[in-house]
Every structure is written in structure tokens, then in C-alpha cells.
């Protein structure tokens, strides 16, 4: 009985070590980039995060509405920061020094327009 218990314990521990090791290997393949956007509100947050969810290689994105910064975790071999910026611009927003696609920007609701845009709706 002690032998069976010992064997099960060793098996469980070795499985746990393998899981931890494989997770750390996965983390090494992920890169993180932070990008300044022209987002204005929670609608912008949803739009940008949804656009990035469909970008190949992007694992997670989180936009901080107050700072206008989006933090993106992505697979290095699947995409690049340039492609991520391009996806943001195609959603209608500036991404660092890359300007928003004019056609996509024109389709944004008034609350999502840049504050200096005459069509922008002020936020309370």
C-alpha cells in the first residue's frame, strides 16, 4: 500500500513540474507592447479590444481609458507591433504615431471622435 501511495505521489509531483515548466516556455514566446491610442470612452475600449481579438497572434489586450494606453500580449512569431498598430488604425483610432484610417474614423460615433474634432460629442 505504501508503494502505491509513493508511486502516485511521485507521479502527481512530476506532472505538476511538467505543467509549470511548459507554462514558463509559453510565457517566453509571448511579447508585450503598450501603445498610445486616441480612445475617448468605454465604447472605444470595446471597439479596440474587439479589433485586436481578431488579430492573428494577439492573446490578450487591455485598454486603460484614462491613459488611452492599450497593453497587448502577442505571440512574437505570429504578429508584430506594427501589425497591431495597423489593426488599431483600421478600427478608426490613432496608434502611437500612426494615424487612424480616415474612412474608419469617419464611421466612429461622435463620443469616440477626438476632442479637437468639430463633430466630437463632449464627455461628461
Image (spheres, rainbow, N blue to C red):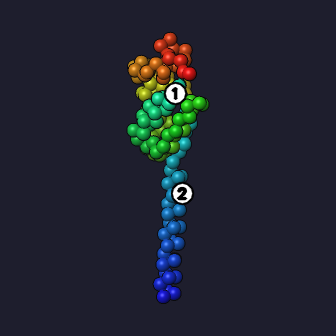
Q: Is 8 above or below relative to 76?
A: below
Say if residue 101 shows up in the picture: no
Q: Residue at x 50, y 36 (%)?
A: 81
**Mark 1 residue crowding within 10 angstroms, few (<14) / some (14–19) / many (20+):** some
Front disc: 2 or 1: 1
- The numbered dot on residue 106 is none
Name the quarter where the C terminus is drawn: top right
Q: Is 3 above or below relative to 42?
A: below
Q: Residue at x 40, y 20 (%)?
A: 107
> Horizontally, is 67 left or right of 55 in the view?
right
Total numbered circles: 2
Q: Residue at x 47, y 84 (%)?
A: 4
- The numbered dot on residue 41 is 1
Depth check: give the residue in front, 124 or 111.
124
**For the residues bearing labels 2 and 1, Cβ distance under 8 angstroms:** no
Whole-percent x, y for residue 74 in the image: 48, 43
Mark 1, secondary structure of its residue: loop
Whole-percent x, y for residue 18 in the image: 50, 66
Mark 2, secondary structure of its residue: helix
Judging by the rendered image, the residue that carries numbered circle 2 is 24
Say if residue 43 shows up in the picture: yes
**Mark 2 residue crowding within 10 angstroms, few (<14) / some (14–19) / many (20+):** few
The residue sitting at the front extreme is 124
The residue sitting at the right extreme is 67
For marks 2 and 1, give the CA distance.
35 Å
Whole-percent x, y for residue 109 in the image: 43, 21
Depth check: give the residue in front, 46 or 51.
46
Q: Earlier in the sequence, mark 2 or mark 1?
A: 2
Depth check: give the residue in front, 41 or 19.
41
Q: Is 89 above or below relative to 2?
A: above
Amino acid at each position: 500500500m505504501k508503494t502505491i501511495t509513493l508511486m502516485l505521489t511521485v507521479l502527481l509531483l512530476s506532472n505538476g513540474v511538467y505543467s509549470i515548466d511548459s507554462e514558463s516556455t509559453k510565457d517566453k514566446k509571448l511579447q508585450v507592447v503598450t501603445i498610445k491610442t486616441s480612445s475617448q470612452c468605454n465604447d472605444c475600449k470595446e471597439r479596440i479590444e474587439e479589433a485586436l481579438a481578431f488579430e492573428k497572434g494577439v492573446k490578450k489586450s487591455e485598454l486603460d481609458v484614462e491613459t488611452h494606453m492599450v497593453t497587448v500580449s502577442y505571440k512574437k512569431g505570429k504578429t508584430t507591433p506594427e501589425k497591431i498598430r495597423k489593426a488599431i488604425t483600421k478600427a478608426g483610432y490613432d496608434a502611437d504615431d500612426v494615424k487612424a484610417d480616415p474612412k474608419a474614423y469617419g464611421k466612429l460615433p461622435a463620443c469616440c471622435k477626438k476632442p479637437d474634432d468639430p463633430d466630437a460629442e463632449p464627455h461628461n
